[in-house]
Image (cartoon, grey):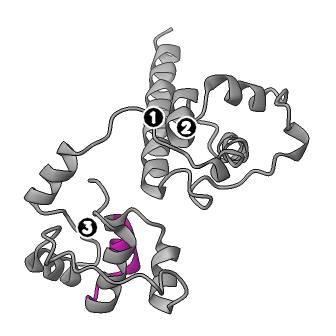
Amino acid sequence: MTAPFMPKATAKWLVDNTALTFKQIAEFCEMHPLEIQGIADGEVASSIIADNPIKSGQITREEVERCEKDHEAKLKLSKEAAEYMASNKRKGARYTPVARRQDKPDAISWLLKHHPELSDPQIVKLVGTTKNTITSIRERSHWNTNNLNPRDPVLIGLCTQSALNAAVEKAQKKAGTKAVSATSDAEAS
């Protein structure tokens, strides 16, 4: 699933007008549950005007009611919205503002420290960097190694929590299948 058209505005409306859990809203809007809690507390997105996802066709009233009854259920985009989002997927590299570019080495350092199971191509896709930069940070030969401060790429805005979770899950599955095949190879000999 892809994020709604205006995630914070949608999240604000869902917080104000439904009985959905923070987790449900966070998953639907591809945000962190703490951001949703901040919206509910009025600390985040206070100046943003709430956007009704039912009026805009992102979800149906029935879908909201279904998820309000079952707090483990996940909200699903309407068919029309899902088709629209799929047809408007961008191809190629995404733009990172100049102000965020210096944060990339910190994010790479954090990913290498907290999620060593991630492959270099996964880190490249998450942060929008190069394999050479990842290698230099891993080998501590990066020009700014002494000043690197590992920081979560989600919190500094380089990737979404759902993209990070998906990459980690994929890497863990891949590592798990390799571990299982290595164990069965050892048992066979």
Q: Is residue 140 above or below residue 154?
A: above
Q: Earlier in the sequence, mark 2 or mark 1?
A: 1
Mark 2 or 1: the one toward you: 1
Would residue 7 appear left or right of 104 to someone viewing this image?
Answer: left
Q: Amino acid at mark 3?
A: Lys
Q: Residue at 70% across / 28% down in the picture?
A: 133
On the rendered structure, is 48 left or right of 114? left
Q: Which mark is residue 93?
A: 1
Residue type beneath disc 1: Ala
Mark 1 or mark 3, which is nearer the start of the sequence? Answer: 3
Please provide percent x and percent y for residue 75: 23, 68
Is 107 on the left or on the right of 147, as rendered?
Answer: left
Which numbered disc covers residue 128? 2
* Residue 51 in which image quadrant: bottom left
Tell which tag, 3 or 1, sits nearer the viewer.
Answer: 1
Disc 3 is placed on an element classified as loop
Point out residue 130 in the picture as x, y percentages from the top left corner.
Answer: 61, 27
